[in-house]
Image (cartoon, rainbow, N blue to C red):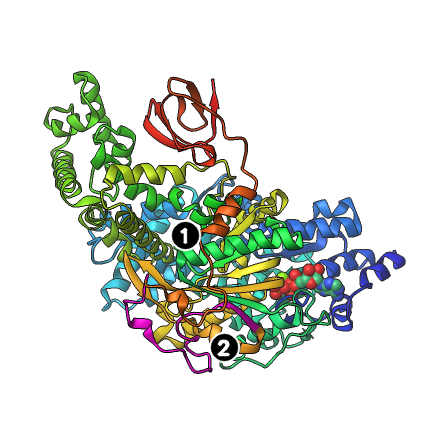
Amino acid sequence: DEKRAADLLQGLNPQQEEAVKHAGSPLLIVAGAGSGKTRVLSHRIAYLMATGRSNPGQILAITFTNKAAAEMRERIETLVGGVAKTMWISTFHSSCVRILRREAKSVGMNSNFSIYDSADSLRLITLVAKGLDLDPKRFTPKMIMHKISALKNELIDDESFAASANYSDPFEQAVADVYKGYTERMRSANAMDFDDLIAQTVYMFRAFPGVAEYYRRRFRHILVDEYQDTNHAQYALVRELVGVPGEHNTVDIPPAELTVVGDSDQSIYAFRGADVRNIVDFEKDYPTARTILLEQNYRSTQTILNAANAVISRNPNRPEKRLWTAEGNGEKIIGYVGENEHEEARFIAEEIDRLQDEEGLRPGDVAVFYRTNAQSRSLEDVLVRVGLPYKVVGGTRFYERKEIKDALAYLRVLVNSDDVVNLRRILNEPKRGIGDRAEYSVAALAERERISFMAALRRAGEAPGLATRSLNAVNGFVKLIDDLSEVASGSGAAAALEAVLEQTGYLAQLRSSADPQDESRVENLAELVAVVREYEKDNPEGSLGEFLEQVSLVADADSIPDAPEGSAEEVAAAVEESRRQGVVTLMTLHTAKGLEFPVVFLTGMEQGLFPHQRSATDPAELAEERRLAYVGLTRARKRLYITRSEVRSMWGQSQYNPASQFVGEIPGELIQWKREGMERPAWGGSSGAGSSRYGGSHWGAGSASGSGTGGNISAAPVAKAIGRVQPQKEVISVAPGDKVNHTSFGHGTVLAVEGSGDKTVAKVKFDVGEKRLLLRYAPLTKE
Ligand code: ATP
Ligand code: MG
């Protein structure tokens, strides 16, 4: 064992070794990105066991994602063997679920409580608010939910909020009332939401010292990764488990040994209540604490680190720390400015292709990051077109996102009111008072009279047992669809989509929400409007129906592995998968935390997009955006690209965004520009080549003739890429009349075939309707 312990110290630098060996007092390891914090945690755990200071059951390790947990478990297993299986290595939420289920009985709870996700919580909050006769327009259920969540993260329960709320503020009054009702309903439903899992565990420890004592005796070593992103409830949970002398501590157990690691420069979850002060104040919270700094970086080249150092050093009030590596400078950062987002995406696809050819890189080595989910759309389009396999991690593919499906469902209904699936999808979306019972009653009428569902809606007065209120709601819906149909037939696809988003109230509902996720939904819809506008520009004769067909082509390109729905926990498996399968990983900067990739593209580096518009007037927001930039830059091991586009369409409008100030903060000599923009990076020092930025007219008028050095990106190399990058599979050959089978649409008959080779498109009649399929991608077999 002595030998094994010594082996564990092999290859660590002196500070890392010290951190692994430290014993006794609480330990804080603060260090910049890629300096081995997570690695030290794993080695420390293995070392504790190898030296006999701890047995596996006494260790509780908390990491940010399940992937990190699985990785840590694996590493420890290779170091110490199968006993690692019995250890508690998990996220905050899963540890708490485990504790709560185990202890429920002893504290008078049912151990089979359900866990409500945010959709469930929202439904319940809406109900409670309605019961209180609150005006949902004044205080939306989303706003209330957001506030309740923030309170729970601060460990303020409904009673203490009721006692302290400012009742002259109508919002606080409303929150206090709903919080109380919501808590009661959750209790009687025997349910907990995500925030409850942490908060209730803390409350339980405080109310039942015997339970707390059990866990304090049990866990003698507590280790927390990414401590800078803990919120107050998580902070308190750790403190309860450690058992700080004199605090809620009735028996005489020495406190557990606490090790936390983190980097205040990587704190990027303030919007979820994370509080950097937890790490900044660690020495104050644990006066006997020892702090160890790690400085050497083992992940990236010095060029990448210099860029990251330069950017983060602009943040105020941070202790200066500089990352360095023994690995040498490596390649320069490559910069590229596309004329628009499609060209930017095309450059990325071609670069990946080139790296494969010239340097033997695999797509799985590459990650592409962006600030907002909506940005994945133009990237996905190009990757699909050139046949580079990819995976969107921690988010859903663009055309599978709920808000996009909802909007398209409206458009499909406008084109075909018999489309019963899409019709029923939007019947009560957004909520307009047509509940399940009303829907059922209309369906019964349709069946009885053998008429379509739409026809039955028009005759809803005859529907069995339909309440007057529902009848009015149904009539309103029919009128809405008729109005929208008129717009669609008279004014084209883009006008129809905009009318749908406005007149249904869909957009208004998202805009009034305080949930950050809804903000990204609005951005996605803006992106969809841009898609339609562009389609109309390229196809002046095109109809709404034809647009929808084209969308189906991209959306059907599903021979590429699917992304999971995006909880932070599932990111884990997904990243692992894409590496294993050798596919390019697409993700937001937030999702990228803790990960590393040989090649990283930071895209959309534009002022207003990243840093986000919101930060323009708020220095705290800007500092958080800068930390996010630092996280992004430091994910790269060997090669880093920063790209942006001069023009980007949002809401169908061309926006001329200047370069992100973060680009200007990177010293110019670190970047080799493959193609520069019309103007130099806005904050970039060197005098610009004119400022036609807002000139409008240069868009499309050959701006590549500007200062660029390599602006010869044309369709040709992409065509080359299409030819060379492996087709996903043989293109099947079909002829009109052939019977075929599609993995999603089932049996069908080929009606017509157009084009040839990779571009062959077949028109196929399925039970669900006619589809145009690009044979190269369609999961289609002949029967
Ligand atoms: P982040 O802040 O991004 O979470 P981190 O500080 O947790 O980064 P790690 O992920 O632990 O850093 O380490 C970064 C990389 O450096 C990993 O590939 C790790 O294996 C490697 N590494 C760390 N320390 C050493 C070392 N002493 N010798 C060799 N490689 C090391
Ligand atoms: Mg780490």
The quadrant of the rendering that contains the N terminus is bottom right
Residue type at mark 1 is Ser
Q: What residue range appears in magenta?
A: 671-700
Residue 355 visible at all:
yes
Image coordinates of residue 724 in percent, x first then y, are 56, 43
**For this view, does 72 lie left or right of residue 524?**
right
Decide: few, some or many residues near mark 1? Use Cα within 10 Å; few <14, some 14-19, many ≥20.
Answer: many
- Give the image quadrant in which the ligand numbered 2 is located: bottom right
Q: Quadrant of residue 616?
A: bottom left
Q: Residue 521's mark?
A: none
Residue at left 24%, top 27%?
Answer: 440
Q: Residues within 10 Å of mark 2 (few under 14, many from 20)?
A: many
Answer yes or no: disc 2 within 8 Å of ligand 1. no
Indicate which disc residue 378 carries: 1
In the rendered image, the vertical position of residue 67 relative to residue 546, given as above or below: below
Q: Residue at x 52, y 54 (%)?
A: 350
Residue at 26% x, 29% y: name it: 419
